[in-house]
């Protein structure tokens, strides 16, 4: 078996628990570690590319908005990582359209279609 094959077999499947990835972002110039799932990092990078922002700029703005919201509500502090996740889901939910859902194959009784959890239908066990 080649080294490439062994690497491929050790790669986690989309259904595997994937560890959080820590990257350092600069919040207002201050290095700050941020731990997110790889799919959230990919989404954040995609959003920043689309919005012509750096991850640092977006996270700094989000942190500023989060702090402002926390001061107004006198609520419990929310971590930046949680705020980033909520932001990403909200961003994509707002962008979702009926046409987009239809293109993705959504609304046909299988909510996992076109997601990392999409699997082919189980094959019945062969009697033998």
Image: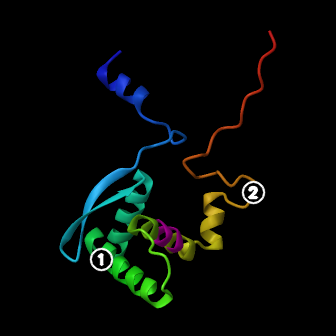
Q: Is residue 37 left or right of residue 99?
A: left
Residue found 32% across the figure and 75% down from its top: 58
Q: Is residue 76 above or below residue 45?
A: below
Residue at 51% x, 42% y is 14
Q: Disc 1 designates what residue?
A: 60
Q: Quick one: quadrant of the C terminus? A: top right
Q: Residue 30's x, y, as percent?
A: 19, 71
Distance in Å between CA atoms under marks 2 and 1: 39 Å
Residue lying farthest left?
Answer: 29
Give the mark, 2 or 1, whose residue is nearer the N terminus.
Answer: 1
Picture disc at residue 108? 2
Residue that appears at 50% across and 87% down: 73
Query: What is the magenta range?
Result: 85-90
Q: Nearer the viewer, residue 74 or 54?
A: 74
Residue 26 location (% of width, % of height): 22, 69
Instruction: Write down the quadrant of residue 3 in the picture.
Output: top left
Name the quadrant of the N terminus. Answer: top left
Crowding at label 1, few (<14), some or many (≥20) Cα neighbours within 10 Å? some
Q: Position of residue 127 (x, y in %)?
A: 81, 14
| Residue 107 drawn at (x, y percent) | 72, 61
Residue 5: mark: none
Residue 52 visible in the current orientation: no
Residue under the image location 33 percent in, 80 percent down: 61
Disc 2 and disc 1 in contact, CB within 8 angstroms: no
Q: Seen in the image, is 60 located left or right of residue 38?
A: left
Q: Is residue 111 visible?
A: yes
- Up-down relation of residue 9 to residue 115 (above or below): above
Q: Quadrant of residue 5?
A: top left
């Amino acid at each position: 078996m080649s080294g490439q094959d062994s690497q491929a077999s050790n790669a986690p499947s989309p259904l595997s628990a994937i560890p959080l990835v820590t990257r350092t972002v600069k919040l207002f110039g201050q290095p700050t570690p941020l731990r997110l799932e790889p799919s959230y990092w990919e989404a954040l990078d995609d959003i920043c590319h689309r919005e012509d922002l750096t991850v640092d700029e977006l996270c700094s703005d989000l942190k500023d908005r989060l702090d402002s919201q926390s001061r107004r509500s006198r609520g419990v502090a929310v971590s930046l990582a949680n705020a980033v996740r909520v932001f990403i889901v909200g961003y994509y939910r707002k962008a979702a359209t009926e046409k987009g859902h239809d293109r993705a194959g959504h609304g046909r009784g299988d909510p996992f279609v076109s997601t990392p959890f999409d699997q082919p239908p189980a094959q019945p066990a062969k009697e033998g």
